Image (cartoon, rainbow, N blue to C red):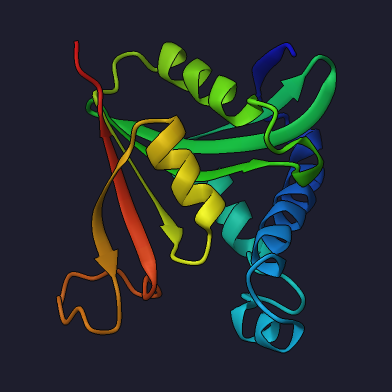
Amino acid sequence: MSVRLELLKTEDEESFIKDNQHAFKYGAEQYFSQSEMEEQYEEEGEIISRETIHSSIHKEGAIAYRIFDEDKKVGGIIINVKDGKGELDIFFVDPSHHSKGIGQAAWKEIERIHSDVKVWETVTPYFEQRNIHFYVNKLGFHIVEFYTKFLKDKDMPEGMDGMFRFQKIIKD
């Protein structure tokens, strides 16, 4: 395995979006029945909409990477870095490449490239047990908040019901 990151190229954006949608849909299919899947869609047939991914790629300050294993595209990452804080917006590995250490190797590369970041944050839905395991047990993130309909915080981001917020503090 030889994992590397490359900045996302404009001509690869459409395949990045489709690969991301495939990976997120696969994750939801592992949890939800076919009838429950429709309730999870952001757009027809997709757990994450094309617009959500496109907006993430083009958000001010966003940095999008393609993950390669050897010369094969196997995933992607979108981060946002500002003032020593990093936000992991989107992270996916093609399901056919799960459990091979690719995600962990890609994240180590993110931390190496962005060594000025001392606090990383991300969110993932409660049903994504693979992600929760990955962030906590493999990457060293901690769950710092669980957004739920019972949380009556006026500052709760819209659409975050059923989401865990993770944080990783990098110690020198």
In-image side of 151 versus 63 (left or right): left
In-image side of 18 versus 93 (left or right): right
In-image side of 165 versus 8 (left or right): left
Residue most toward the right? 71
Residue 49, relative to residue 101: is it above or below?
A: below
Residue 162, relative to residue 114: is it above or below?
A: below
Image quadrant where one finds the N terminus: top right
The image position of residue 140, as x and y in percent, is: 35, 31
The image position of residue 137, as x and y in percent, is: 41, 36
Residue 41, relative to residue 105: is it above or below?
A: below
139 or 80, nearer to the observer: 139
Image quadrant where one finds the C terminus: top left
Badge count: 0
Quick check: can you spot residue 61?
Answer: no
For the point 16% across and 82% down, the residue is 152
The image position of residue 116, as x and y in percent, is: 29, 15
In-image side of 61 versus 23 (left or right): left
The image position of residue 31, as x and y in percent, is: 63, 70
Picture quadrant of residue 38? bottom right
Residue 107, relative to residue 53: is it above or below?
A: above
Residue most toward the bottom? 35
Quick check: can you spot residue 97?
Answer: yes
115 or 165, nearer to the observer: 165
